[in-house]
Amino acid sequence: MTARLFINTTQLSFPQKIGDSVELSPDDTHYVRDVLRLRAGEPLELGDANTGLVALTTIACLTPLVAVSFHSILESRSPTPYSFTLLCALLKGQKNDLVCDWATELGCSHIIFWQSSRSIVRIDNEKDRAHKELRLAKIATAAAQQSKQSKPPVVRITRSLSDAFDSFLASPTAQELRVVCSLASGSQPIRQMFSASPPTAPCIVAIGPEGDFAPEEHDFLVARGFIPISLGRRTLRSELAVVTALSLLGNR
């Protein structure tokens, strides 16, 4: 299987002409040469991280920087006919890494982490927030390359639910489905909710932290059009709730 590498076109021009050749950055050179261990003459799919455009290239040389020559522009091999966003509370330990990885492989276009009042992980300051966000974005990019997504998801971290909505979540669009995975009585079964929505409808899935949402957080989401849904009789860990909800969503 041909490896895929995403580049940021704000740093490197993405050629359109067959035969064009470009050098990769030192970081991408290390990834191609030392991690993927590709050699001259081997193919590499080069993706535009902003547009999702993917080109088939060949490794032209390996030193001092890896250079590739362009052969053709490819259609995405795994196009996503829908767009969905994960709104997930910050979790403890390495769970945020896993959520970012799994949500990317399951096709999320946006992953927004937020600091819940019950989150164990805390954001100390803006520098800490930006550092955590950059780290998770790199994890998402690696997962997108491995799973052959058309482009990496947008990854953001905010200090509260209100910050997430003020910065990244506008009013619901036409047909948009907003759901919150809830332990509250009366929550609708997830399969029933997803089967009733159009397969291509955009969706936002909200997942709470360990210990569930604080009451005011749950009410905040419901007031903004989120429908409480149930994942079943068992109480799942937050990271497993992410995988369960997104898997069902992607198979509507």
Image (spheres, helix red, strand yellow):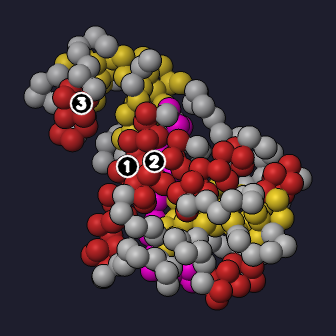
Q: In the image, which disc is placed on residue 139?
A: 1
Residue displayed at 77% across by 65% down: 229
The stretch of residues the image draws in magenta is 148-166
Instruction: Find the distance from the CA under tag 3 to the CA under tag 1.
Output: 15 Å
Where does label 2 land, which residue?
Answer: 101
Q: Residue 76: say if magenta.
A: no
Residue that lies at the very extreme toward the top in this rendered image: 41
Q: In the image, which disc is placed on residue 241?
A: none
Residue displayed at 40% across by 55% down: 97
Residue that lies at the very extreme toward the right in this rendered image: 196
Label 2 Cα crowd, 10 Å radius (few <14 / some 14-19 / many 20+): many
Considering depth in this image, is 242 or 40 the residue closer to the camera? 242
Residue displayed at 55% across by 66% down: 88
Q: Are marks 1 and 2 in contact (CB under 8 Å)?
A: yes
SS type, badge 3: helix
Q: Amino acid at mark 2?
A: Asp
Q: Residue 158: say if magenta.
A: yes
The percent position of residue 74, horizontal first and vertical second, equals 53, 24
Label 1 Cα crowd, 10 Å radius (few <14 / some 14-19 / many 20+): many
Q: Is residue 215 left or right of residue 103?
A: right
Q: Quadrant of residue 161?
A: bottom right
Q: Is residue 160 above or below residue 89?
A: below
Q: Does the image show residue 55?
A: yes
Q: Quadrant of the N terminus?
A: top left
Q: Amino acid at mark 3?
A: Val
Instruction: Find the distance from the CA under tag 1 to the CA under tag 2.
Output: 6 Å
SS type, badge 1: helix
